[in-house]
Amino acid sequence: MADAPPITLPKPLVLVGLMGAGKSAVGRRLAARLNVPFIDADSEIEAAAGCSIEEIFARHGEPAFRDGERRVVARILETEPVHVLATGGGAFIDPDTRALIRERSISLWLRAELDVLFERVSRRSHRPLLKTADPRAKLAELMAQRYPIYAEGDIIVDSSAGPIGVMVDRVIAALATYLSKETGD
């Protein structure tokens, strides 16, 4: 893919999907390849709140976190130039956030199978929604609830185990196809 013509993003690219899909890891490398800034919504939320997402959940609950997430994503999409934005797994589920993403950006769902997601999220224990007796079952439940909504994204790319560079190549190819259809090239 290195010899493919460069892609110019006409507006921000927002990565959506469940935790462990690779939004931040792919997003960082993708932004570097596209020569645009990378923004991680979760990091921005933590900076705005002055504490970790896990602490926000513990102190204020999920509804307060989602409210802050909605405000941060809106601020980024309204004020930042063209960029790659990695959102948290629940951001696109919120109807207002989803509408704003549709209006102001290109959305790309990194879709992954349960085994891939679970293997990735099992490496760390900072995921508040997975602090249950059966985190795999919770992840499967989230997939059932959220995948139909993520499917409303502009582009869908399957995230699989393997080198991250391969994932970035897949995303760039899917993005190029999407942009050529949008512009009629």
Image (spheres, grey):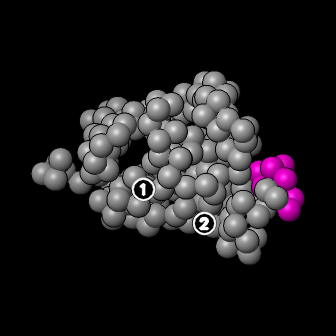
**Residue linked to disc 1:** 25
Number of marks drawn: 2
Q: Dot 1, how many residues are within 10 Å of its Cα: few (below 14), some (14-19), or many (20+)? A: some
Q: Could you say whether the residue bearing mark 2 is in a helix, strand or loop?
A: helix
Reply above or below: 84 against 111: below
**Residue 15 is at least partly visible in this image:** no
Q: Dot 2, how many residues are within 10 Å of its Cα: few (below 14), some (14-19), or many (20+)? A: some
Q: Main secondary structure of the magenta part?
A: helix
| Residue span colored magenta | 59-66
Q: Residue 42 in the image: x percent, y percent? A: 62, 60
The mark that comes first in sequence, 1 or 2, is 1
Q: Residue furthest right?
A: 60
Give the quarter of the figure containing the C terminus: top left
Q: Residue at x 36, y 55 (%)?
A: 30
The amino acid type of the residue labelled 1 equals Ala
The picture quadrant where one finds residue 176 is top left
Q: Nearer the viewer, residue 154 or 49?
A: 49
Query: Distance between the Cα atoms at labels 1 and 2?
Result: 13 Å
Q: Residue 38 in the image: x percent, y percent? A: 46, 64
The amino acid type of the residue labelled 2 equals Ser
Reply above or below: 43 against 106: below
Per the rendering, the mark at residue 43 is 2
Q: Residue 12 in the image: x percent, y percent? A: 49, 54
Q: Residue 156 in the image: x percent, y percent? A: 44, 32
Q: Residue at x 71, y 47 (%)?
A: 131
| Residue 35 left/right relative to 146 | left
Per the rendering, the mark at residue 69 is none
Q: Could you say whether the residue bearing mark 1 is in a helix, strand or loop?
A: helix
| Residue 54 left/right relative to 63 | left
